[in-house]
Image: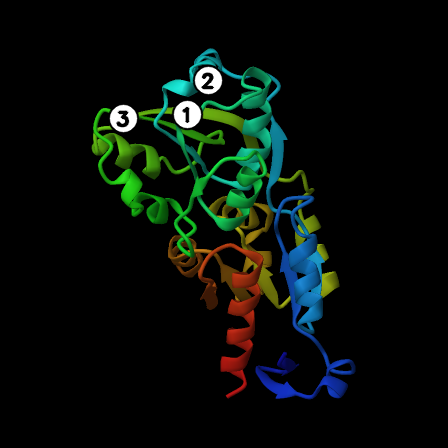
Amino acid sequence: MTYWRRAPGRFWPTSMAAKLAAPRARVLVTRPAGQADALCAALEAAGCSAHHQPLLELQPLHALSPQAHQNVLGLDRYRHIIFISANAVKFGMAWIQAHWPQLPAGPQWYAVGDGTARALRSYGVEVFTPGAAMHSEGLLALPQLAAVTAQRVLLVKGEGGRGALRQTLQARGAGVDELACYRRCRPLLSPGELAARLRQWQVNVIMISSAEGFANLQALLGPTETTELKSAVLIVPSPRVARAASAAGFEHVVTAVNASDAAMVQALQERLQARGE
């Protein structure tokens, strides 16, 4: 493992012995509550100082819409069932198993990423994933979803979202339904509270897990507070979020391969190494 010491405006490699005494990269992890422990541990193990402040809260739906309820009852009619996130597995499978204690054998099951796939495999199904391309575009590149004319697709997801997956599958001729099973909310922080925590922790790296998380970061900071952060390193999970961050004026945006813990840590390490030239 290579460790890095930070001096004003510069990083450079240092020894294991010096690591303990050296100032460390101070990283804000923004995953939802209950989903950040492994990433924080990996950052600490890599010689960073990790702080957790969720930029997204997840709330289960206490009741499904009538249409979503019908979609669950007719689960065996679908050729493809796609889970957008591990949260979709957590909340969606609770509704599905309430009506299907034995899952139907006909559908093919899909997960947007490795964490989602692990959660889904725990229910005993074979899962198709896009590998490192953990986003809608990666799923759409799978050969199983290339020719879907007249096939039925169920998207298991949170409320709202981009809509790109649904639109593309419909353009390919599929009949697409949704099972919205949870909602994503902005954390309830008072004005100035997030900025105060960032100053207290002296954060110089922020890890963003999603486009909504980045939007909430902007919404929770005032203009002056945002300006103070624009010199921080921003680790983001996709080119789409990177473009939004650059457009917002962030000066040091690093795009990870995907949103996984390993990819986020690797992106940070590569950034620190590049700064240590």
Closer to us: mark 2 or mark 3?
3
Q: CA distance from mark 1 to mark 2?
A: 7 Å
Residue drawn at x 69%, y 75% as measured from the top left? 24
Corner quadrant of residue 239: bottom left
Q: Position of residue 52 (x, y in %)?
A: 69, 54
Q: Amino acid at mark 1?
A: Glu
Q: Which residue is mark 1?
A: 178
Q: Which residue is mark 3?
A: 151
Please indicate, yes or no, whether residue 111 appears anywhere in the rendered image: no
Q: Position of residue 238 (x, y in %)?
A: 42, 56
Residue drawn at x 51%, y 40% as measured from the top left? 85
Residue drawn at x 52%, y 43% as measured from the top left? 116
Callouts 1 and 2 close, C-beta under 8 Å: yes
Q: CA distance from mark 2 to mark 3?
A: 18 Å
Q: Quadrant of the N terminus?
A: bottom right
Relative to 58, say whether 134 is above or below: below
Query: Mark 3 vs mark 1: which is more N-terminal?
Result: 3
Q: Which residue is mark 2?
A: 68
Query: Mark 1 vs mark 2: which is more N-terminal?
Result: 2
What element does badge 2 sit on?
helix
Please indicate, yes or no, whether residue 126 appears anywhere in the rendered image: yes
Query: Mark 2 vs mark 3: which is more N-terminal?
Result: 2
- Between residue 203 and residue 77, name the one nearer to us: 77
Q: Position of residue 139 (x, y in %)?
A: 36, 44
Q: CA distance from mark 3 to mark 1?
A: 14 Å
Q: Dot 2: few (<14), some (14–19), or many (≥20) neighbours within 10 Å?
A: some
Q: Dot 1: few (<14), some (14–19), or many (≥20) neighbours within 10 Å?
A: some
What element does badge 3 sit on?
loop
Q: Position of residue 158 (x, y in %)?
A: 50, 32
**In the image, is 13 to the left or to the right of 238?**
right
Relative to 36, say whether 178 is above or below: above
